Image (spheres, rainbow, N blue to C red):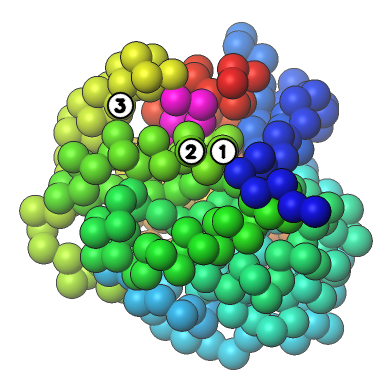
Amino acid sequence: MTNLGIPAVPQRQRTEIGGGVGYAFNGQHFTIGSGADLNQVAATLQHPLSVILQVTKRCNLDCGFCSETLQMPDPSIEQLAVIRDNLSGVNRVFLSGGEPLFRRDFGDVVDLYHGGGHIVAVPTNAVYAELHASRMVGKVAYVNVGLEGPRAVTTRMRGDYDAIMAGVRVFQEHGIPLAMSAVVYRSSLTALPFTAQIGDVIGASKVKLILPLRKGNALGLPELEFITQDEALAAFSRLEEKAAELQWSPALRMTTWTPENEGHMIVIEPNGTARAWPVYDAKDLWEDLGNVLEEPITEIWKRYRFKVQHLSKYVGKSILTTAQGALTGKK
């Protein structure tokens, strides 16, 4: 028996990590004390709060904003096991891509990381949900589905809206918690209320809005599609007002590319290379940190120079946020 249309609600209890940092909703949301000094807390961390592991660079779609267009071979299960061991202590691992569900053995990858004690999250376009959802149940804390909004907008920017929504329904049927992310163009600003509404309808815990970066396919975008920081702030303010008026359930988040967000992500490529991303003055926006096939993340963390930005972003201090929605327990 399925529970179509009634997605599982993530657990709300907070788990302490150390240094005043904790996470709630099974790793969907990191928190820190309101009076905490970010520099002091960052100095106490021995490893990242969260990393993005590209289990493949391959993808079934060709999004106009995609930064990851350069290809390389997929890591083997044996290599992924070494990476898993070297990520010991990291609280959350995003099994990412490319499109991670493009791997036929993705269920084995999930087993590997769930069994390693990590909170496992999966960013996906959901098109291949039918192939893998059954093996993700109880092992993946949540899937983050990329969806820019209504059919015409999503299809223009990302790919087949109907195939994505079919995958969303599969995740719902299996009770796998959902979040959403949407890349924002100037031409998609008017669609943002509909994007939030879709997130509300599918039971997403949060809707993350992200501005494109000039890399990969996005180098071909018209310049007018890149909005300014002021435009982003204004758009989010309007959306926040609508969220309060219409009582949308998802928490809303927007990441813009300010100095406070530089280098905040640690991305591990299929060959094990760990990089800080995005580093604005670096080639391809990457800064090499080391290789987790060769050394533990604790050693890589020591040479990572964006610790404060990493902490600040993941605890929601350097991004635009609303207090609305499932992350605050308001349904």
Does 133 lie within the magenta span? no
- Amino acid identity at mark 1: Gly
Distance Cα–Cα, label 3 vs label 1: 18 Å
Which of label 3 and label 1 is nearer to you?
1
Q: Residue furthest bottom?
A: 73
The reply to whether callout 2 and callout 3 are in contact (CB within 8 Å) is no
Residue that appears at 80% across and 53% down: 1
The reply to whether callout 2 and callout 1 are in contact (CB within 8 Å) is yes
As rendered, which of 29 and 145 lies closer to the eye? 145
Distance Cα–Cα, label 2 vs label 3: 16 Å
Question: Dot 3, how many residues are within 10 Å of its Cα: few (below 14), some (14-19), or many (20+)?
Answer: some
Q: Which residue is mark 3?
A: 239
- Which element is circle 3 on? helix
Find residue 21 and report its horizontal and vertical position in percent: 72, 26
Question: Dot 1, how many residues are within 10 Å of its Cα: few (below 14), some (14-19), or many (20+)?
Answer: many
- Which element is circle 1 on? loop
Does 249 lie within the magenta span? yes
Sequence-wise first label, 3 or 1: 1
Q: Which mark is residue 201?
A: 2
Q: State whether residue 101 is above or below residue 278.
A: below
- Which element is circle 2 on? helix
Residue 232 occupies quadrant: top left
Find residue 256 and report its horizontal and vertical position in percent: 34, 40
Q: Which residue is mark 1?
A: 203
Find residue 244 and report its horizontal and vertical position in percent: 38, 15
Residue 303 occupies quadrant: bottom right
- Amino acid identity at mark 2: Val
Distance Cα–Cα, label 2 vs label 1: 6 Å
Q: Which residues are magenta?
A: 248-254
Residue 33 occupies quadrant: top right
* Res 294 seen here: no
Sequence-wise first label, 2 or 3: 2
